[in-house]
Image: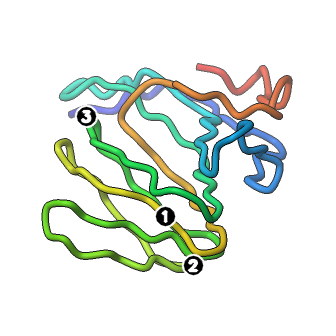
Amino acid sequence: MAVSNKLVPLTVIKGAGYEFIPLPAGQNATTADFHSIRTQTTDSPSYFTSGFYKIEAGPHRPAHYAFEETKYVLSGQIDVLDEATGITHHLVPGDFAFFHVGSKVQFSTKSQGFAFYAVTRPVRSPHPNLVGREEDKARL
């Protein structure tokens, strides 16, 4: 695949911190998408979205994946029950997990956890505190 000689500016989002994400009323976990783009990859066009995952103690949060996702734990602990194996993984800062299309899991924590994620889907839950923080000149 040839790369164009046209230079494309990067996208910078100031203050996309996970510490500013409120949990919805009555919920113990949420996502906050902060960037998404319809990729220009010619061999497999898709969406590429990134954001933060926040969870606090409470009920298990089930997820059945129709897209790929990576999660990188930044702080706390996030427990992930992999329903395919029955194994609960205790993810702590520095741990990475990849969820394939068809993965079925349950997220939980005994305290709280924060993770960065990147997924192959469009935005579904925008970060609530980023209005006006994406630099206009950086858009493709």
Res. 61 mark: none
What residue is shown at x 63% (from left), y 54% (from top)?
Answer: 54
From what the image shows, is residue 104 above or below residue 7?
below
Q: In the image, what residue type sits under mark 1?
A: Ser
First in sequence: mark 2 or mark 3?
3
Quarter of the image that includes the N terminus = top left
Identified at 51% across, 56% down, the residue is: 59
Judging by the rendered image, the residue that carries numbered circle 1 is 108
User: Residue 62 at what x, y percent from top left?
Assistant: 37, 48
Residue 83 is situated, as x and y percent measured from the top left of the image, at 20, 60
- Please determine whether, in this image, residue 50 is positioned above or below residue 77: above
Which label was assigned to residue 66?
A: 3
Q: Secondary structure at mark 2?
A: loop
Q: Position of residue 57 (x, y in %)?
A: 62, 65
Q: Of residues 4 and 40, which is closer to you in this image?
A: 40
The type of residue carrying mark 2 is Pro
Observer-side mark, 1 or 3, equals 1
Tally of numbered tags: 3
On screen, residue 14 above or below 114: above
Judging by the rendered image, the residue that carries numbered circle 2 is: 93
